[in-house]
Image (spheres, helix red, strand yellow):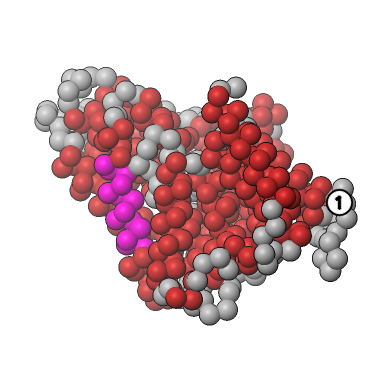
Amino acid sequence: MTKGRYIGLASAIVLFFLPWFVEFPGLPVEGHRVLGIFLAAIALWITEAVPLHATAVIIILAEILLVSDKGILSAPEGFEPPSFRLFFGTLADPVLMLFLGGFFLAHGAAKFALDRNLARVLLRPFGTSAPMILLGLIIITAVFSMFMSNTATTATMMAVVLPVMSTLPPGDRMRTGLALCIPIAANIGGMGTPIGTPPNAIAIGALARDGISIDFLQWMLMAVPFVLVILAFTWVIMRQLYRFNGKRIELSIESTFDTSIPAKVFYVTFAATIVLWLTTKMHGMSSSIVGFVPVVVLLSTRVFSPKDLQSLQWHVLWLVAGGIALGVGVGRCGLDAWLIGLVEWNSLSSTMIVAALALTALVLSTVISNSATANLIVPLAMTLAASDGIAVDPMVAAVFVAIGCSLAMALPISTPPNAVAVATGAVRTRDMALVGIVAGSMGLGLFLFAGQWYWALVGVLR
C-alpha cells in the first residue's frame, strides 16, 4: 500500500468521525451520520485508498449499520429509519440489470470476435485516405461504445490500428491521431445510450426513484444528435492537428465471422436485444427487463459458461449500486436538502444552475472516476431541482451531470480508454489535454446552448 493510499485512508477515517464531534446547525442527527459516510466516500473515491467498488459496498454496510431499521444505533427521535432491505436492494436495482445485459452483449461480442470483425467490415467503405480512415475510426468507435464498455471498445479498436501504427515513422503525427481518436470517440459515443457509460445509468436510476422514466430510445433521442455534432467537430480538429505525411493508409480489413451454433445464437440474441431496446414503447417492457433477456438466453443455451460469468465487470455493477445506496441515504436522512441550503441557488438563473452542475461534474470527473463523480453529484442535483424556487427540471439536472462526467477526457487518469491510448506510447499527455479540453468544452457548450431547447422540441421534456 502506497503512502498516498495510507493518507487517503486516514483522511477517510477522520472525515467519517468529524460529524460525530462537530455539530452542523440545521442538520438532523441522522443527517450527521450520513454526512460522515458521504465525506469518507469522497476521500476514498478520490484517493482510491481502497478499490472503487470496495468503497461502494462500505457505503451500503455503513448505512445499514448506522441509519437502517436493523442498525446498531438507536434511531433519533422523530426519525423513521428505512428498511435495511432498501440498501441491500440496491445491489439488484433495475438499472443494474440493464447494465448487466450490456455486459453480456459486450463480452459475447469479444468472445466470438464480432466486435473486431464488424470493425474491419465497417472500415472498408472509408478507403485508404488518412482523413477518411480517421473519420471511420471515430464513427465506428463511437457506435461500438454505445453498446459496449468504453474500455472494451478502445481495446478492440486499438487491436485494429496498432499494426498500422507500427509501420508509420516515429515522428509521423498520424500515429498520435490514430491512437488518440479512439479513446476520445469512445468517451463521446458512450453518452449515446443508457448502457454506454455508468453515469448514464446512475442518472436514469435516480430519475426512476423520483418517478421519471427514460427508456432506451428516449435517451438516444436526447443524446445521439449531440454526439454526432461533437464527433464531427472532433474529426475536423484532429484532421488538422494530425496530418499524415504519406498518401495512403492500409488497414487490415480481412474478417472471418464465427459460424458455430453458439456464435449464431449470440448474433440473434444481440440483434434481438437491440431491437427490443429501441421499441420499448411498442411492447411495453422496460429497458431493464429487456436487458435481462440476453442474460437468461445466453446462460440457458450454454453459450455462456461459468468462466464467462467470472469475466464480467461485476465491480462496475457494485460501484453503481454503492452510488444508488448513497443517494438513498442522502435523501432519506435530510443531508441533500441541508447541503443544497448552503448555497443561495435562488439568486442564479436556471441556465447558470445547470451549467454549474455540469461544469462541476466535468472538472471533478477529470481527476476521479466518472462513476464516482456521478454517484456524488446526481443525488444532490436531483434534490436541488426539486427545491422551492428552483426552475430546473429534475431530468435536465441529472442528465447534464451525466453528460458532464462523460465529457471529462483531458488526462490519462480521466478514463480507462485514455490510459489505454497513453500505454501505446504514441500519445503524449499534452496532446490528450488539448483535444480533450477542446472537445469537452465544445460539447458542454453545445448541450448548454441547445440541449433543453432541442429536448422540448422533440417532446422529451415535460
> Is 202 in front, or is 392?
392
The N terminus lies in which quarter of the figure? top right
Residue 224's spot in the image, x, y percent? 39, 58
Task: Give the residue type at disc 1.
Answer: Leu
- Classify residue 32 as left or right of residue 225: right
Find residue 264 and report its image quarter: top right
Q: Which residue is mark 1?
A: 73
Question: Which residue is pictured at 22% across the width and 42% down the height?
Answer: 238
> Is 124 in front, or is 318?
318
- Classify residue 459 as left or right of residue 15: left
In the picture shown, does residue 247 fall above or below 347? above
Question: Which residue is pictured at 74% across the width and 63% down the height?
Answer: 28
In the picture shown, does residue 393 fall above or below 426? below
Residue interval drawn in magenta: 434-447
State the residue lying farthest toward the front. 22
Question: Which residue is pictured at 29% across the width and 55% down the height?
Answer: 442
Q: SS at mark 1?
A: loop
Question: Which residue is pictured at 27% across the width and 43% down the height?
Answer: 435
Tell me, yes or no, if residue 298 can be seen here. Answer: no
